[in-house]
Image (cartoon, grey):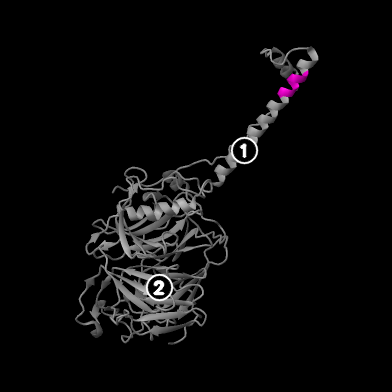
Amino acid sequence: MAKSGSEVPELESWCWSGGHSSTVHRDKVYVIGGYIAEFSSKSRTVAEMLFGNPYMFVYDFSKSSKSSIPPALPIIQPVKDMAILRDAAFWSLGDDNGKLLLSQGQFESNLPISVDNHTEYVYNTTVQSQKDGIVNTYDVHEDSWGRIRQSTTESGQLLSSTARASTTFAKKAGKGFALGGRVSPTWILNPETEEFASIAYDEGIKTTFLSSMLVYHSKPGEEGTWTNEETNLGVSESGTLNVLETVGKDGVLVFLGGSSGDEWRSLDTVHVYDISQKTWHNQTTTAAYGTIYPRARNSHCSVVASSPDGTSHNIYIYGGQSSDISATALSDIWVLSIPSFQWIQIDPSNGADPARPAANMACESVGKHGRYMFVFGGDPVTGRCDANGAAKLLDLTTGLWTKEYDFEAPYEVPVVVQKAISGFGKEGAVKSKPEGGFDDPVLEELFVSKISKAQPGSKGLSTGAKAGIAVGVVAFVALLALAAFLFMRRRKAAHKYGVPASTGSESYVVEELDKAPHSSHAELPNQGSEIVELPARSFTK
């Protein structure tokens, strides 16, 4: 397939975008597909140009930046050889592999534009369908695309591509997952008539919602094969899947939100998939602060960050489309802390420009220790432009939107989450179970056994706790030394004046202490950490 190009002008008239797919490879974020809205020179508030995204944007997060998010490198996608996809699966197959795999999704209904002239559309109907499960691969080293013509199971079953599936890649297991979604015909928007039309290739296809999960295998011996696993979750689309790599033998998946046909899936229950056992388990969630609970939503984005000692895993969700009648976009941020399975709201508005409501954005965890959430694009639903631009960065420790990026900065559990789970900050979570207990004994075995291994003896103590213990030991030793000194001094005085040391009279000791020079005693500094609860906006369940 044709080689990509990298000499591309910046998109200065960005308005909003959505439907992208993203992945991280060697600390670089790759974003591809979806649609982009631009404003003209006459209007900077409302989108006037909507087109399929002809670029793959690359953001290099391998270096720190004090004042700005790393700039994007736009790479031209060979749109005449491969389809621009919306809501697809995009995975890095490992740092040593050097390949990015693009699969699933559906053809972007908005036609791509010419990269030389953003007022001209590129018509090409020969590569616009994903009906036959085409899989494309991008070679990072060669900057070129290749194609696997069709995706099939080991038995030879041809797989149709699913769009709006919940997707992720588990590194330890070497598997990619696409849960649910839909198979539907491709519709193309004619920009001249502003009407949609189905292409002939997809005639006769009816929209079908899926309940199964496609699994891609990348390890040697099974590389390039797919399996189609049935689930007991019912149909679903536009939710999120996150991997907890250190839980269980090969990690677990956590499925959040999304919709089932015309109904939104409540966040009062989440679904956990044990990768090694290929089993699903349900778990009820609770609100950490009474009735403060996230709204049901789809088309949101999420990342996961774990405490350094592995005792708590915090899944952050941002934005999405609400389940109310108006289907408005959301701007709120929530954390599902596991294994307590509690929801805590984060308020990022204090001291920074809050992100505007958006849905259908792409986001990834970045930083050496996963301290940040990088967000690309997002559809405001209202059609209004986003003055903050396409790229945003959320500091997962402070809970603030920021432009300062420190590659080496460690992730620490936010104070408001610490308070909810009664943890010690950098390490540890006291609540090792949900308030009502685990709904499934398998989940208890997965998570509680993990915490027990992570905290043998006193190793689970936080840095603050360890410092407090050290101060206590020093103070105790000092008191022992003082008591020994006074005891010996008393014995010497008693011998000199002929007073028996065991008379029981304390008058002489008091007199000697009164005559001794007084020391100026300074109070030891408080070794604990001040706990401050972040303000939070409330949503009722």
Residue 262 numbered tag = none
Marks 1 and 2, Cα distance to the nearest angstrom?
51 Å
Residue hosting label 1: 471
- Lower position in the chain sequence, tag 1 or tag 2: 2
Give above or below for 125 relative to 175: below
Specify few, some or many for label 1: CA neighbours under 10 Å numbering under 14, 14-19, or 20 or more. some
Residue 228: image location, x then y, percent: 30, 73
Disc 1 vs disc 2: Cβ atoms closer than 8 Å? Answer: no
- Say if the magenta span includes residue 487: yes
Give above or below for 87 relative to 343: below
Give above or below for 442 relative to 364: above
Q: Is residue 518 visible?
A: no
- Say if the magenta span includes residue 36: no
- What is the magenta segment's predominant secondary structure? helix
Q: Amino acid at mark 2?
A: Phe
Residue 46: image location, x then y, percent: 36, 66
Magenta span of residues: 486-492
Q: Amino acid at mark 1?
A: Val
Residue hosting label 2: 90
The foreground one among 491 and 512 is 491
